[in-house]
């Protein structure tokens, strides 16, 4: 499982130019079953994604295709987490 942090860069003002393509990138990740959760880092610092079912290399390649990353609207950090204990509602993450 991974947490992807997408923190706004100095080019944050360019976000409106690329937001439609960024949202399509998010939809593809959800439709592909890779992104489990996508949300904002508050207050207005960027976004975060919880991802699973993909290799670290493939996830980094997918993140590199995010239009916000391509146009330096955000900087991306991929954090790999190995779940050991979960609430029963999230037990699928340890399978």
Image (tube, grey):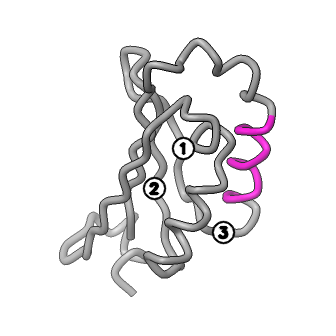
Label 1 and label 2: CA atoms lie apart by 7 Å
Left or right, 41 with reference to 33: left
Relative to 1, residue 95 above or below: below
Rendering coords of residue 12 (x, y %): 53, 18
Q: Are marks 3 and 2 in contact (CB under 8 Å)?
A: no
Please report the bounds of the magenta region as a residue range: 21-30
Question: In this figure, which residue is indicated by the disc labeled 1?
Answer: 38
| Label 2 packing within 10 angstroms: few (<14), some (14-19), many (20+) | some
State which quadrant residue 84 falls in.
Answer: bottom left
Residue 20 placed where, x, y %?
80, 31
* Left/right of residue 20 with respect to residue 49 in the rendered view: right
- Badge 1 or badge 3: first in the primary sequence: 3
The quadrant of the image that shows the C terminus is bottom left
83 vs 5, nearest the viewer = 5
Q: What element carries label 1?
A: strand
Q: Distance between the residues labelled 3 and 2?
A: 11 Å
Q: Which of marks 3 and 2 is nearer the N terminus?
A: 3
Residue 33 has which mark? 3
- Confirm or deny contact between disc 1 and disc 2 (CB under 8 A): yes
- Mark 1 Cα within 10 Å, few/some/many (few <14, many 20+)? some
* Above or below, 61 relative to 23: below
Q: Within 10 angstroms of label 3, few (less than 14), some, or many (20 or more) residues? A: few
Locate the N terminus and report the quarter of the image it occupies.
bottom left
- Badge 2 marks a residue whose secondary structure is strand
């Amino acid at each position: 499982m991974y947490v992807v942090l997408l923190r706004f860069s100095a080019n944050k003002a360019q976000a409106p130019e690329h937001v439609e393509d960024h949202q399509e990138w998010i939809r593809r990740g959800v439709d592909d079953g890779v992104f489990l959760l996508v949300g904002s880092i508050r207050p207005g610092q960027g976004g975060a994604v919880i991802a699973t079912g993909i290799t670290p290399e493939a996830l980094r390649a997918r993140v590199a295709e995010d239009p916000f990353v391509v146009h330096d609207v955000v900087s991306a950090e991929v954090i790999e987490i190995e779940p050991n204990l979960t609430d029963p509602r999230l037990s699928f993450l340890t399978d």
